[in-house]
């Protein structure tokens, strides 16, 4: 198992999701207003606050499990928390991708792929 690469990807996911969750918490109103406009022509236009909360919860969990996963690898070379972090991260990114596609923000959807590739690579390495 290529542990340094796994730790680096987990750190990448931790930084990505913890910072994103922090931004949502500290600027909930700003994020909510922007997203209401972003999703105004989609089937979830009336569920934006709930969707934002779901994404916030998934991001915080993904980031937390990534940090715990790094600790688990360093302390006892385990892989259970890194696997959970990878799966939660992939699910989070798939939700984000779905939202961007629904909003017809294809550039935004393309950006999600940049985060998705190392996440899938992480899961591949952890599976072998």
Image (cartoon, rainbow, N blue to C red):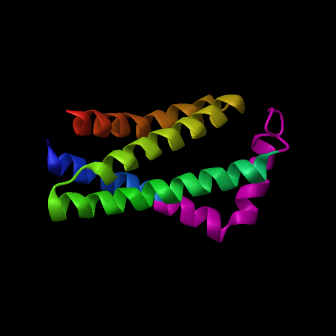
The image shows residue 53 at horizontal and vertical percentages of 68, 56
Where residue 105 sits: x, y (%)?
A: 66, 32
Q: Position of residue 101 (x, y in %)?
A: 65, 29
Quarter holding residue 127: top left
Residue at position x 24%, y 39% in the image = 126
Q: Is residue 107 above or below residue 10?
A: above
Relative depth, front residue between 40 and 73: 73
Q: Residue furthest bottom?
A: 26
Q: Main secondary structure of the magenta part?
A: helix
Left or right of residue 104, residue 15 in this image: left
Quadrant into which the N terminus falls: top left
| Residue nearest the viewer, comparing 25 with 125 | 125
Query: Which residue is drawn at the image coordinates 55% and 61% (left, top)?
Result: 21
Of the 4 image quadrants, the one containing the C terminus is top left
Residue at point 42%, 62% (across, down): 64
Specify whether 78 is left or right of 117: left
Q: Residue at x 65, y 51 (%)?
A: 54
Measured from the top left, where is residue 74 in percent x and y?
17, 62
Residue 88 shown in magenta: no
Number of marks in the image? 0
| Magenta segment boundaries in residue numbering | 18-46
Left or right: residue 25 versus residue 40 is: left
Q: From this view, report whether residue 118 is shown above or below residue 76.
A: above
């Amino acid at each position: 198992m290529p542990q340094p690469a796994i730790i680096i990807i987990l750190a990448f996911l931790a930084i990505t999701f913890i910072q994103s969750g922090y931004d949502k918490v500290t600027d909930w109103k700003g994020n909510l207003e922007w997203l209401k406009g972003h999703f105004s022509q989609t089937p979830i236009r009336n569920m934006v606050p709930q969707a934002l909360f779901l994404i916030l919860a998934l991001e915080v969990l993904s980031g937390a499990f990534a940090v715990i996963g790094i600790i688990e690898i360093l302390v006892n070379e385990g892989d259970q928390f890194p696997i959970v972090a990878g799966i939660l991260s992939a699910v989070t990114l798939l939700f984000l991708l779905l939202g961007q596609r629904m909003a017809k923000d294809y550039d935004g959807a393309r950006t999600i792929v940049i985060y998705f590739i190392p996440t899938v690579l992480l899961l591949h390495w952890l599976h072998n």
